[in-house]
Image (tube, helix red, strand yellow):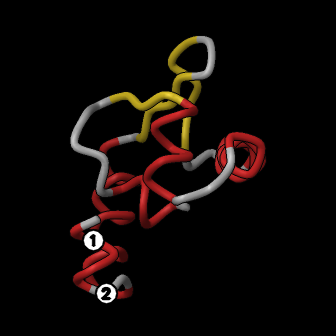
Amino acid sequence: MLRLLGMHPGVEMSGPAAAALAAATPAEADRACGQLLAARLLTEAGLDRYRFHDLARAFAYARAEAEESEPTRGA
């Protein structure tokens, strides 16, 4: 989830956007985002909205480029 969210083009993302990026159910995305919040890799930006710190987002994006296949990144 961290890598996939790092590819989101906006500053903030919603829970449904996180689910779509990860091809996950809303409940699965909520759990994953909750874990990222607990690890302080995401912050809450409002009701069901999340935001990365700039450095965490750069790290997540770099990991996505290194570890996700081209078709996954393109999707």
**As drawn, 68 above or below 29:** below
On screen, residue 30 versus residue 7, left or right, reads right
Quadrant (top left/top right/bottom left/bottom right) for the C terminus:
bottom left
Q: Position of residue 73 (x, y in %)?
A: 27, 71
Q: Nearer the viewer, residue 20 or 36?
A: 20
Residue 6's disc is none
**Callout 2: SS:** loop
Q: Nearer the viewer, residue 60 or 24?
A: 24
**As drawn, 52 above or below 32:** above
Tell me what residue is drawn at x 68 percent, y 49 percent: 25
Tell me what residue is drawn at x 45 percent, y 37 percent: 17
Q: Position of residue 12 (x, y in %)?
A: 37, 28
Where does label 1 land, which residue?
Answer: 73
Q: Position of residue 4 (x, y in %)?
A: 42, 62
Q: How many marks?
A: 2
Name the amino acid, label 2.
Ser
**As drawn, 6 above or below 59:** above
Q: Nearer the viewer, residue 65 or 26?
A: 26
- Tell me whether circle 1 and circle 2 mark residues in contact (CB < 8 Å): yes
Graded by Cα atoms within 10 Å as few (under 14), some (14 to 19) or many (20 or more), the crowding at tag 2 reads few
Where does label 2 land, which residue?
Answer: 69
**Callout 1: SS:** helix
Tell me what residue is drawn at x 40 percent, y 40 percent: 53
Name the amino acid, label 1.
Arg
Graded by Cα atoms within 10 Å as few (under 14), some (14 to 19) or many (20 or more), the crowding at tag 1 reads some
Q: Quadrant of residue 66?
A: bottom left
Quadrant (top left/top right/bottom left/bottom right) for the N terminus:
bottom right
Q: Quadrant of residue 46?
A: top right
Q: CA distance from mark 1 to mark 2?
A: 6 Å
On screen, residue 39 versus residue 17, left or right, reads right
Tell me what residue is drawn at x 53 percent, y 23 percent: 49
On screen, residue 72 versus residue 20, left or right, reads left
